[in-house]
Image: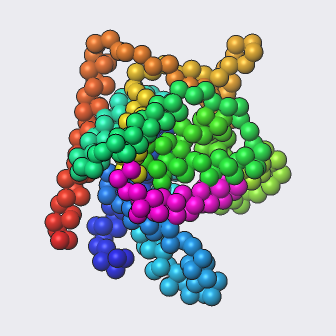
């Protein structure tokens, strides 16, 4: 599988990783949807499943090439390279765009999710009482999550580890947004803003020969939090992939209908027309993070008036749908080329 990949395939796989990484950071958007629409979801899950006892034995015995080939290493390494690059590039751009053009960014993602629903549903024909039930439950769970109120921030390392396990749900389960789950758990700012910024600052200072951060207790705390969160994420990624590979193998129709339901339910989170509700202290002032940004509590959704801004938003929604259809066209063209 690995040796047949062309340079173009590798380049686009990194781009797909960039897309997954960016989607994972946006509350309400699932990186798993990107994997599903781009046509590599099952390969992603089954490759992660290969990280098991046999793989560990190969690694311990020093058979690195065998280990790399066994876990489909080229595929995973290119994909994760894209995700890592995303956190230091595209996700920064997304932060800027959401801050200045929030309505249009949400509209674009809203359209992409609508396109994803069409993409997944168009080839699914196994509708019966079981799949309709799982579809309904998926929608119900997705909508319910979107209206929950977040908990308070908690930097206990065991809880951070748990957050890591839960947060990767967005990568392995399309329709579940890991970043939105972190908002509900109260740790989005701590884990995806403060700790990531701490790592960026530390790397920058270390390359400049400045090691004063070793005396910065707040920085060290955030780095510990990031390490534990990363370990939790890896644990969750491997655990979820094993469970999902089994479920996909034995209950594929029910799993796919549930995924469609989750994605439909996630539209409640990504609905473009909403007012942001920020966390307030008892005296009515805003609670801010270490960068001075106001911390989001949840969203108040509304039906928009028909005006120029709304028409622009609808245009971006249509653009989002077209992007997904374009990915579908590219996938079909690629299959014909290699077929």
Task: Provide the residue span drawn in magenta.
Answer: 226-254
Say left or right for 164 vs 130: right
Q: Is residue 266 visible?
A: no
Say left or right for 119 vs 288: left
Q: Is residue 245 magenta?
A: yes
**Which quarter of the rendering shows the C terminus?**
bottom left
**Residue at 83% in and 51% down:** 215
**Which residue is more in the foreground, 15 or 97?**
15
Residue 227: image quadrant is bottom right
Q: How many marks?
A: 0
Q: Is residue 264 magenta?
A: no
**Which residue is more in the foreground, 184 or 284?**
184
Picture layout, residue 308 above or below residue 335: above
Q: Position of residue 95 (x, y in %)?
A: 49, 37
**Residue at 30% in and 19% down:** 310
**Which quarter of the rendering shows the N terminus?**
bottom left
**Residue at 66% in and 35% down:** 186
Residue 107: image quadrant is top left
Q: Position of residue 260 (x, y in %)?
A: 36, 43
Say left or right for 191 vs 104: right
**Residue at 76% in and 57% down:** 211
Q: Position of residue 176 (x, y in %)?
A: 48, 43
The main secondary structure of the magenta stretch is helix
């Amino acid at each position: 599988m690995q040796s047949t990949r062309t340079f173009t395939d590798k380049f686009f796989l990194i781009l797909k990783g960039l897309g997954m990484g960016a989607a994972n950071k946006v509350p309400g958007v699932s990186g798993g949807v990107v994997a599903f629409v781009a046509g590599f979801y099952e390969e992603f899950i089954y490759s992660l499943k290969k990280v098991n006892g046999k793989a560990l034995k190969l690694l311990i015995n020093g058979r690195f090439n065998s280990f790399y080939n066994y876990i489909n290493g080229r595929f995973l390494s290119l994909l994760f390279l894209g995700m890592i690059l995303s956190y230091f590039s595209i996700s920064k751009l997304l932060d800027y765009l959401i801050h200045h053009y929030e309505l249009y960014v949400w509209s674009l993602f809203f359209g992409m999710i609508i396109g994803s629903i069409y993409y997944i549903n168009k080839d699914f024909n196994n509708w019966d009482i079981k799949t309709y039930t799982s579809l309904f439950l998926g929608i119900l769970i997705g909508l319910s999550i979107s209206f929950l109120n977040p908990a308070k921030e908690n930097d206990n390392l065991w809880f951070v580890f748990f957050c890591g396990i839960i947060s990767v749900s967005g990568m392995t389960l399309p329709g579940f947004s890991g970043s939105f789950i972190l908002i509900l758990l109260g740790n989005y700012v701590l884990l995806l803003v403060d700790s990531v910024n701490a790592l960026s600052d530390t790397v920058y200072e270390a390359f400049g020969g400045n090691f004063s951060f070793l005396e910065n207790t707040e920085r060290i705390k955030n780095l510990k939090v990031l390490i534990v969160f990363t370990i939790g994420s890896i644990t969750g990624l491997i655990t979820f992939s094993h469970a999902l590979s089994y479920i996909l193998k034995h209950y594929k129709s029910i799993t796919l209908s549930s995924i469609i339901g989750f994605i439909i339910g996630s539209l409640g989170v990504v609905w473009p027309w909403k007012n942001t509700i920020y966390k307030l202290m008892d005296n009515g002032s805003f609670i801010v993070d270490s960068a001075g940004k106001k911390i989001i509590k949840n969203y108040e959704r509304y039906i928009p008036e028909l005006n120029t801004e709304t028409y622009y938003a609808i245009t971006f929604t249509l653009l989002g749908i077209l992007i997904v259809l374009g990915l579908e066209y590219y996938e079909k063209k690629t299959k014909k080329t290699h077929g």
